[in-house]
Amino acid sequence: MTTITINKEILHDLKNDFQVIHSLLELFVKKNESNLDPLINRISSKLNSALGLFKEILVPNERNQSITKSVSEIMNDLKLDLEESLGIKIHILGASNILFVENDFKRIVTNCILNAKEAGATRIKMTLTSSRIVMADNGQGLSLETIAKINKQDFFSTKGEGRGSGVRSIFELAKRNGFRVKYAIDPGAGGGLIIFENIKS
């Protein structure tokens, strides 16, 4: 019998692609809940199962095989792909040598952008410094009450049962890489503002 070996980096890329597709599908479901084909729910369920399988295969080795890069380097590689796949304009200001596990940062940025798109954003401004990453969007900002709950890490969901884990994922991935997260309202544009602060700096 022939054994086929798949490179773990390929599996990571596939998992990330499935994650993006699943997130986009969740966005579609939210906007079309009143007129939804049952087939969509079946597809969503299958994607969930596939993501669970990727996690089962990859997680035991993920910490040892993860690639750590500077945030600037990751965004240089990721910017065009995100703009094309998610349909949003990303402006990057400054540069940063802050180190992050590449796949963790990709997941954080993807979740943040999907949340911003859901709030009506068409562009993201990412400001990089030696100790902070700030993401601002031009969407409809969260209410002060919601921001207070998020910053206390009260991970409630406004998206219905089984959805809304994006914020929890952002906090957990950031903490794993030595960052704390704070949500706010952009004082200039009034849109969403997410601040990642390096705990060690």
Image (spheres, grey):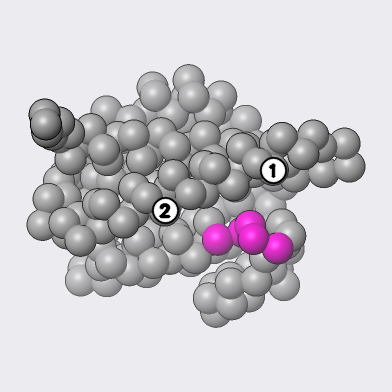
Query: For residue 201: magenta?
Result: no
Disc 1 element: helix
Question: Which quarter of the picture shows residue 169?
Answer: bottom left
Q: Which mark is residue 52?
A: 2
Q: Write the start and end of the magenta stretch as one range.
A: 161-165
Name the foreground residue: 129 vs 118. Answer: 118
Residue 115 in the image, given as x and y percentages of width and height = 60, 47
Q: Residue at x 44, y 44 (%)?
A: 50
Q: Earlier in the sequence, mark 2 or mark 1?
A: 1
Between 99 and 56, the residue placed more toward the observer is: 56
Count of marks, rendered view: 2
- Tell me the residue that label 1 is attached to: 41
The amino acid type, in three-letter code, at marker 2 is Gly
Vertical comparison of 96 with 17: above or below? below
Give, as a three-letter code, the residue at label 1: Asn
Alpha carbons under labels 2 and 1: distance apart: 17 Å
Residue 163 in magenta? Answer: yes
| Other residues around mark 1 within 10 Å, as few (<14) / some (14–19) / many (≥20) | some
Residue 71 in which image quadrant: top left
Judge from the rendering whether residue 162 lies leftward or rightward of residue 125; answer left or right: right
Spot the residue most to the front. 1
**Quarter of the rendering occupied by the C terminus:** bottom left
Residue 175 rendering spot, x and y as whole percentages:
33, 68
In the displayed image of the protein, which residue is found farthest to the right? Answer: 34
Please, what secondary structure does the residue beneath circle 2 have?
Answer: helix
Q: Is residue 26 left or right of residue 180?
A: right
Quarter of the image with the N terminus in it: top left
What percent of the width, then of the height, locates residue 75?
30, 35
Residue that appears at 26% across and 38% down? 11
Q: Residues within 10 Å of mark 2 (few under 14, many from 20)?
A: few
